[in-house]
């Protein structure tokens, strides 16, 4: 079963994919992987060149999701459509 995060249509989680880590919908690329590549010095353009099936919006939403998760706000889960 796949779960979505309201306000983040590109970010989902499934217990059986990526050990339940939040990931970009339709992929096995976790949000934490996006952060690791960017924190390691890769630019967004370089990342998108390497992972050509992803979009700039996927990266932006991963960053926004991570920022919100690190803040004091709770992001509820809901069953994905």
Image (tube, helix red, strand yellow):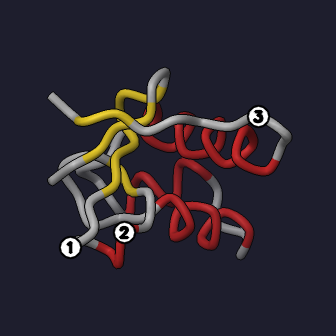
Q: Position of residue 29 (x, y in %)?
A: 35, 64
Considering the image in quadrants, where does the C terminus appear?
A: top left
Earlier-in-chain disc, 2 versus 3: 2
The image quadrant that residue 30 belongs to is: bottom left
Measured Cα–Cα span from mark 2 to mark 1: 6 Å
User: Please, what secondary structure does the residue beneath circle 1 have?
Assistant: loop
Measured Cα–Cα span from mark 3 to mark 1: 26 Å
Dot 1 crowding, Cα within 10 Å, few <14, some 14–19, many 20+: few
Considering the image in quadrants, where does the N terminus appear?
A: bottom left
Q: Which sits in the foreground, 32 or 39?
A: 32
Q: Residues at badges 2 and 1 in contact (C-beta under 8 Å)?
A: yes
Taking the image as shown, residue 39 lies to the left or right of residue 80, namely right
Residue at 36% x, 27% y: name it. Answer: 9
Q: Which residue is mark 1?
A: 16
Residue at 26% x, 60% y: name it. Answer: 14
Residue at 35% x, 78% y: name it. Answer: 19
20 relative to 58, above or below = below
Dot 2 crowding, Cα within 10 Å, few <14, some 14–19, many 20+: some
User: Please, what secondary structure does the residue beneath circle 2 have?
Assistant: helix
Dot 3 crowding, Cα within 10 Å, few <14, some 14–19, many 20+: few
Q: Which residue is mark 2?
A: 20
Q: Position of residue 10 (x, y in %)?
A: 36, 35
Q: Which mark is residue 73?
A: 3
70 relative to 77, above or below = below
Taking the image as shown, residue 23 lies to the left or right of residue 26, namely right
Taking the image as shown, residue 39 lies to the left or right of residue 30, namely right
Q: Position of residue 78 (x, y in %)?
A: 34, 33
């Amino acid at each position: 079963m796949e779960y979505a995060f309201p306000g983040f249509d590109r970010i989902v989680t499934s217990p059986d994919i990526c050990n339940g880590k939040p990931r970009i919908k339709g992929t096995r690329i976790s949000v934490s992987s996006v952060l690791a590549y960017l924190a390691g010095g890769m630019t967004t353009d370089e990342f998108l060149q390497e992972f050509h099936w992803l979009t700039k919006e996927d990266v932006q939403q991963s960053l926004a999701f991570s920022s919100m998760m690190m803040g004091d706000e709770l992001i509820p889960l809901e069953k994905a459509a």
